Image: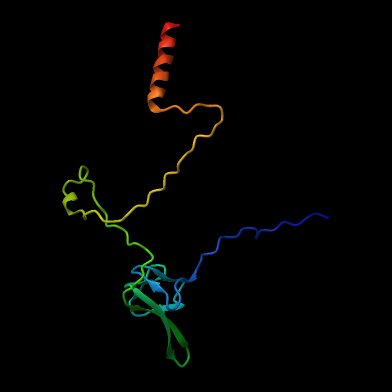
């Protein structure tokens, strides 16, 4: 008896569709609210639909959902909205505007934005302690003298 073969062994990865921002979540302009195929959810106030039916937010605010009765036969339609409001606690620093290099684009460089006051935190320097392992700690001045002596020895030999 021979073993059979199968043709259905390949599979593709999931498309990661669905609601990305739930009701009450804070969103920024351009954030993805829903990824979908077709129009399972419909765009409402302050939202727009992308080419692949993805719903994005137009403004900064919070998300809320409603349902609308279409007609007697079709049932209800789920609609996603963004309530326009400023978000007091921003977790994301907005990206800096694009700046042009003054040498490469001299005609566009005068319109560059001024430098920002972002503070970049530096790592704290750790104090290295010389351990007594049989080696002598050499200062910079002594190191130069030792290097010069080695060069002289090499020249003489």
Q: Can residue 54 be seen in this view?
A: no
Q: Which of the two residues, 32 or 139, is positioned nearer the viewer here?
A: 139
On-image quarter of the N terminus? bottom right
> In the picture shown, does residue 155 fall above or below 103?
above
Residue 32 seen in this snapshot: yes
Image point (39%, 73%), residue name: 26
Q: Is residue 104 above or below residue 18?
A: above
Residue at the top extreme of this rendering: 157
Residue 125 falls in image quadrant = top left
Looking at the image, residue 36 sits to the left or right of residue 108; the answer is right
Name the image quarter holding residue 41: bottom left
Viewport quadrant of the C terminus? top left
The answer to which image quadrant residue 39 occupies is bottom left
Question: In the rendered image of this protein, does residue 148 appear above or below residue 104?
Answer: above
Residues 33 and 63: in front is 63
Q: Viewed as shown, does residue 132 lie left or right of 51?
A: right
User: How many numbered marks have been drawn onto this rendered protein structure?
Assistant: 0
Residue most extreme to the right: 1
Who is closer to the viewer here, 119 or 60? Answer: 119
- Judged from this view, the residue extending furthest toward the bottom is 72
Residue 58 location in percent, x, y? 32, 72
- Colour scheme employed for the rendering of this structure: rainbow
Q: Is residue 130 above or below residue 111?
A: above
Q: Tell me the residue at 35%/69% (across/down).
A: 28
Query: Where's residue 139, x and y in %?
Result: 41, 28
Question: Residue 25, percent across and down?
Answer: 42, 75
Residue at the (27%, 54%) spot, across then down = 98
Image point 45% across, 74% down: which residue? Answer: 38
Spot occupied by residue 70 in the image (x, y as percentages of width and height)? 42, 88
């Amino acid at each position: 008896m021979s073993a059979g073969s199968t043709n259905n062994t390949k599979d593709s990865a999931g498309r990661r569709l669905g609601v990305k921002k739930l009701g009450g979540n804070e969103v920024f302009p351009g954030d993805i609210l829903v990824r979908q195929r077709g129009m399972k959810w419909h765009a409402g106030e302050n939202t727009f639909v992308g080419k692949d039916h993805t719903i994005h937010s137009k403004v900064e605010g919070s998300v809320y959902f409603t349902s609308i009765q279409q007609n007697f036969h079709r049932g209800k339609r789920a609609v996603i909205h963004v309530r326009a409001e400023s978000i007091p606690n921003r977790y994301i620093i907005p990206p800096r505007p694009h700046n042009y290099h003054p040498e490469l684009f001299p005609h566009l460089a005068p319109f560059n934005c001024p430098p920002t006051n972002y503070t970049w935190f530096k790592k704290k320097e750790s104090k290295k302690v010389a351990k007594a392992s049989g080696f002598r700690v050499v200062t910079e001045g002594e190191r130069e003298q030792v290097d010069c002596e080695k060069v002289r020895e090499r020249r003489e030999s």
